[in-house]
Amino acid sequence: MAFGKIYLFPSLLSPCAPAEVLPQRNIALISSVTYFVVEELRTARRFLKACDRNINIDGLHFEVLNEHTQPKAVEAMLQPALEGHDIGVISEAGCPAVADPGADLVALAQRKGIEVVPLVGPSSILLALMASGFNGQSFAFIGYLPIEAAKRAAALKAMERDIKTRRQTQIFIETPYRNNRLVADLASALPGDMLLCVAADITAPSQSIITKPLSDWKKSTYDYAKRPAIFLLYNR
Amino acid sequence: MAFGKIYLFPSLLSPCAPAEVLPQRNIALISSVTYFVVEELRTARRFLKACDRNINIDGLHFEVLNEHTQPKAVEAMLQPALEGHDIGVISEAGCPAVADPGADLVALAQRKGIEVVPLVGPSSILLALMASGFNGQSFAFIGYLPIEAAKRAAALKAMERDIKTRRQTQIFIETPYRNNRLVADLASALPGDMLLCVAADITAPSQSIITKPLSDWKKSTYDYAKRPAIFLLYNR
């Protein structure tokens, strides 16, 4: 018997109709899958309903994979694929297995020779990079910066160096309530002619993606304290 | 008068129906735009026809932006937006302004305060990262590796170091006819337990995305010489 496949279904970054940000193929495929591995049960059910309001949620099998899941449990989640069933993976927001525990499931599937099929969907990293005007031929996503002052200063220095010597766009995130502080830190620690792009509320009606020099950010009024945002640095 | 917007329309990575890889929103929006900046005229026209076979191509305005375009010409391409018209940007394959000259147009639009709207579409970098099982919380895309032997060896050493010290997935590309040579180089220069993911023909029916240790690649038979591929390295 052939193995089932692992389909990686991107979900929504902000509330909108699935057809705004997902190809029709995803929506058709997701209705054909009955085994799911999801990061958050409530979000996943709501997303499935949004994709197909006639879906029979009670007929579906769900396993929850989050940062508390034991490695042994991850292995068991692949069992349906070994028995020929396709498995859909849905993370809490955006593309599964990029910055969530889905990567462990995918790694194990690869080791077992199960085919993994990634589907197209919204990625705040990629959408922000496109709209920033920065170098997309060389870029690094580094996740969260350290919070502790000395470590944060070192991380900013490392980014400045990678921009200068590698011509590498630096991409990072922050917890929303710390966003304003982050912009202020960047503006005070880095050269004024360095460019900062702040991409907030990506794919929402309130989306804003603004690139300007740190010297301009320093003089600007802004409030990103309640908006999910992603930050990019570069110097053209 | 309000400025027009710059819409970044991803195009296809391989021949398929647009609804396979693009949201319905993109297809509806693209039919409403009359000014386009495109990397390659023939590909862009074919893509527009695939999105909407009733489109009147002769009623559209096209400017070509490629690596030969002068900076002064790029500025002129934004004129319709300053006059209130939306502009669509289409690159030869995949997401505009990520690894093509569209980034110069976007940078200039950002400087002039013109809104830039990135749309969702297929990115071989992101799709490969999702399906690799590698670390998506920290990754770098470094474009092409150097060809010259000493420089290539240094680049491989730098990747090995960034994987070890930064836990950073390394992503890179090669010209297809050199793909097999690249896999052989990686397998002979780097530790056998390091994992290599080769993602070939992404979004095509022949798509294959395979992760295994370099020691396994060394013993495998493979032929990527005529297949567009993207490569990822990591050590879990």
Image (cartoon, coloured by chain):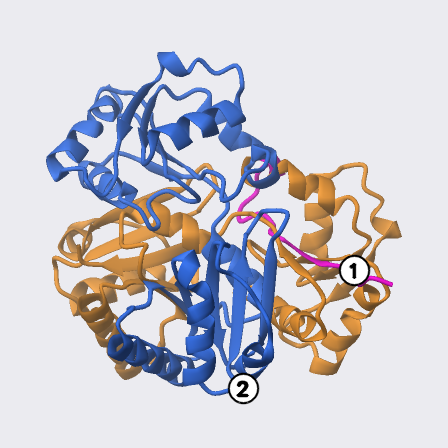
Chain colours: A blue, B orange
Which of label 1 and label 2 is nearer to you?
A: 2
Task: Assign a secondary structure to mark 1.
Answer: loop
Do the residues at pointers 1 and 2 share their chain?
no
What predominant SS class does the magenta segment belong to? loop
Q: Which residues are magenta?
A: B1-19
- Closest to the observer, A216 or B138: A216
The residue at 20%/73% (across/down) is B161
Chain ID at mark 2: A
Residue A140 percent location from the top left of the image: 38, 67
- Closest to the observer, B48 or A184: A184
Image height of B27 relative to B198, above or below = above
Number of labels in the image equals 2
Q: Quadrant of the N terminus of chain A?
A: top left
Give, as a three-letter code, the residue at label 2.
Asp
Residue A142 horizontal side relative to residue B108, left or right: left
Is the Cβ of the residue at disc 1 closer than 8 Å to that at disc 2?
Answer: no
Chain ID at mark 1: B
* Res A193 label: 2
Q: Quadrant of residue B80?
A: bottom right
Give, as a three-letter code, the residue at label 1.
Gly
Identify residue for label 1: B4
- Closest to the observer, A210 or B182: A210
Image height of A14 relative to A195, above or below = above
The residue at 33%/26% (across/down) is A36
Task: Assign a secondary structure to mark 2.
Answer: loop
